[in-house]
Amino acid sequence: MNSNIWLLSFADSVAIATTLILAALGALFTERAGVLNLGIEGMLLTSAITSFLVADSTGSVWAGMLLGIVLGAVLAGIHALLTVVLRANQIVSGLALVIFGTGLANFLGKPAEGKTIKTTIEPLSFGPLSDIPGIGPVVFGQDPVTYAALLIAVVASWFLFRTRAGLEVRATGDDPATVDSQGLSVATIRIRYTLLGGALVGFGGAFHMLAQSAAWHLEATTNGVGWIALSLVVFAGWRPIRLIFGAILFGFTLQLPFTLQAEQITFIPSALMPMLPYLATLIALIALSRPSSRNILGAPKALGIPFVRDER
Amino acid sequence: MSNTSHEVASGPYHSGGAAPSALSAHSVSKRFPGVLANDSVDFDIQPGEVHTLLGENGAGKSTLAAMLCGLYQPDSGYIARNGQRVVLSSPRAGLQHGIAMVHQHFRLVDRFTVAENVILGSRNLSFVLDRRSINERVSEVAESYGLPIDPTATVGDLSVGQRQRVEIVKALYQGAEILLLDEPTAVLVPAEVEKLFENVHAMTQAGKSIVFISHKLGEVVEISDRVTVLRGGKVTGHVSGRGATDTKDLARLMVGRDINLGTQRASHPTGHEVLQIRDVSLNVNGVNVLSNISFNVHEGEMVGIAGVAGNGQKELADTIAGLLSPTSGSISIGGATATDRGPIHARELGLAYVPEDRLGMGLVPSMSILDNLLLTRDRHIVVDRASVRPEATRLIEQFEIKANGPDHLARKLSGGNAQKVLLARELSGGRTATKLLVVCSPTRGLDVGAIETVRRLLDDARSAGQAILLISEDLDEIMSLADRILVLYRGSIAHETPGETAQIATVGAAMAGLTTGVNG
């Protein structure tokens, strides 16, 4: 067994995990405020193609990144408008967003089909540190967005559990009526964190395009990562730090077939491992639909429920 | 009306030299579509005073309270704080003037700690929370009013009484000088009520004013310095409290006629055993909801099951009604076994069931009174409405149901009238004459007039020889109606006593799990 291949594969897992971490953090913030946004996959695709087109035409990956983030927030804004302001069913709105986002991305992506982006995000170089055998490429060989994603997850955890605003978000997801009675606006908080969540998802989509995929392959560009991100939030119990480890684990199973191929291990069918995250997604969505399991998992109590003040 | 006007208003009955009221309402009116909820209402409260708002549901006390705390604004009239006219545009504005409402349905996040709940919404805290200093401050505020509470406890683990304390501490922490307590005793066991009253005294000693909103006459007389009685949106009386008045006078002011909510017990000896429960246990998801319950209910007897909500009452009722199968033990109705035979069989044996959730389990809200009656009458393929219509009309009259006739939709009935429809259906029997009536919280949420009617109907059914199992959280109701009282605590019968000689202290202690012996 070639230990180098396994180390490289772990380094790749962390890279794949970056998209997952960003998209799942986006979902986490949205859901902590009580809004379920199933549209992550559509938002990822739209942000991905936007960042592709912008980066391709301007030659700046960072401009692409920025526009990707903005598009994520814009799509989340549609969801917020429909579900928070107009109190539409969150599941229906989320699914509609998947279809809309996918269609929009395919439409915008016409000129990009078969093209590869020339400028991509390069891994940071820490000089000799990156060349340390073993941990070097894993810890010091990632691109800046990966480090940013990890930092965002740590800050998110601190924000949610150690600040006043974090307390208000969590309260809004659990018990909006209480938040309302304290003179805080449930709608404002929900819209704010749905938009923030959308921006993070957009960030993930742009990163996936510019640092991972580099070519536009229609829906296959994201390949269901948005759905996996949703399940990741469930398995992480809506906690950002746990989400990092889950993302790396899912990332590892997603890239495993390539490693197995390189190692010429054939007794495990190569299609089996990448199936596991989707299986996990299926289980997570079933768990989300059952009140008893929702409670055990620690789901925000008002997740998916529009807030209506009960007037007497 | 403007916030800046400094017109000095004197209290309605404290004019002339006296200190201005802490809070007062001056001929405030509030109209909702179709109802004049408050009609020129005057109210005032002094520092250190307990002033009760008494009235039936819909009398306007909640509307007045909502205007006093900033939830609603009056259409006419105005609110004054320390004699200064104020506009309370929101509950937050109310809080800024030191006015806080403790809602009947607690506004607490179960997963948060006590301290987190107390500080939620506080604007004067730093962005980053320092847990230790927050916990200390919350403890400090709580203890200064004799309301000890652990700031690190999770609210979801607390008892109802403790949660209420958290709500009060929250209001005090936010600097409330005037607390409006909306039906605060509705959810408490007697020992907790006593504790609450001690806390109220501690707060008034410290100069806080308490607006107490209630329809329970006994406790109103006990706790209030003054009482304002509302009926139909108007003030019908200002009375001094603390024994200066009696419950009969208050009831008359509240309802507009004499009310008899006195004791009613079986007038003649009871007959055969109708319901026999032997060693019934029920296990739901690995939790023993009921353990080894045994008791009988006889013809013409009313047995009351007292207890705090969630001690197995609902499950006991559902098990008797055949909706749940007991894990072990047996149930028989009228001598025939009913265990594991399902709800239809139980009804065929003469069971009638009035569940707690009137419009959820009891009636179909979207159907008419007639169709709701048909549910227990007609088992044919084609529904025969014509044959039941005369009965429906008769029952509407007999049970004094306020409706436009048999075709009135159930969901358009008031709580009291819905309950009367349910009782009418169950008491009048379906295909089998009713032998056993199981009723859960029959008067919850009803106003005094309707409570009186429902109680009378139950008493009539008892006199007619029906066996009645009355399951209620309203201890007063059980004390004044039941011939025998059983206390359910954590799924077991913790106490049994004849209704005649029952002591409220003993029964209350058993409800709180303080005694385990069976006596009487």
Image (spheres, coloured by chain):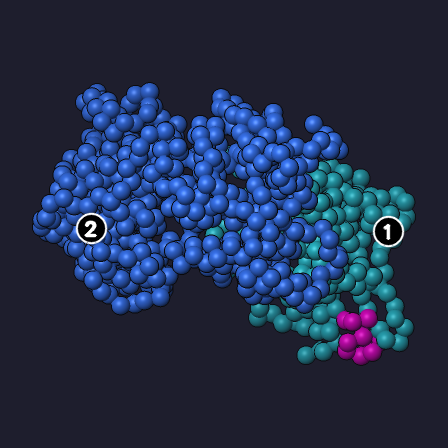
Chain colours: A cyan, B blue
Q: Please indicate whether residue B453 sits to the left or right of residue B110 in the image.
A: left
Cα separation between marks 2 and 1: 82 Å
Judging depth in this view, the residue of B60 and B201 nearest the camera is B201
Mark nearer the viewer, 2 or 1? 2
In this view, B392 is above or below A180: above
**x and y percent of residue B266 in the render?**
16, 45
**x and y percent of residue A172 in the render?**
62, 49
Residue A270 shows in the view? no
Q: Quadrant of the N terminus of chain A?
A: bottom right
Asked where in the image residue B31 lies, by quadrant, the reply is top right
Judging depth in this view, the residue of A107 and B337 nearest the camera is B337
Is residue A132 shown in magenta?
Answer: yes
Question: How many C-alpha atoms fall within 10 Å of the one at disc 1: few (<14), some, or many (≥20)?
Answer: many
Residue B136 shows in the view? yes
Q: Which residues are magenta?
A: A131-140
Q: Which mark is residue B483?
A: 2
**x and y percent of residue B61 in the render?**
49, 35
Q: Amino acid at mark 2?
A: Asp
Q: Give the prevailing secondary structure in the magenta stretch.
A: helix
In this view, B36 is above or below A182: above
Is residue A134 shown in magenta?
Answer: yes
Q: Secondary structure at mark 1?
A: helix
Q: Amino acid at mark 1?
A: Val
Q: Which residue is mark 1?
A: A61
Asked where in the image residue B385 lies, by quadrant, the reply is top left
Marked residue chain, label 2:
B
Q: Which residue lies at the image location 21% right of the left edge and 53% below the top edge?
A: B500
Q: Please indicate whether residue B232 sits to the left or right of residue B10 in the image.
A: left
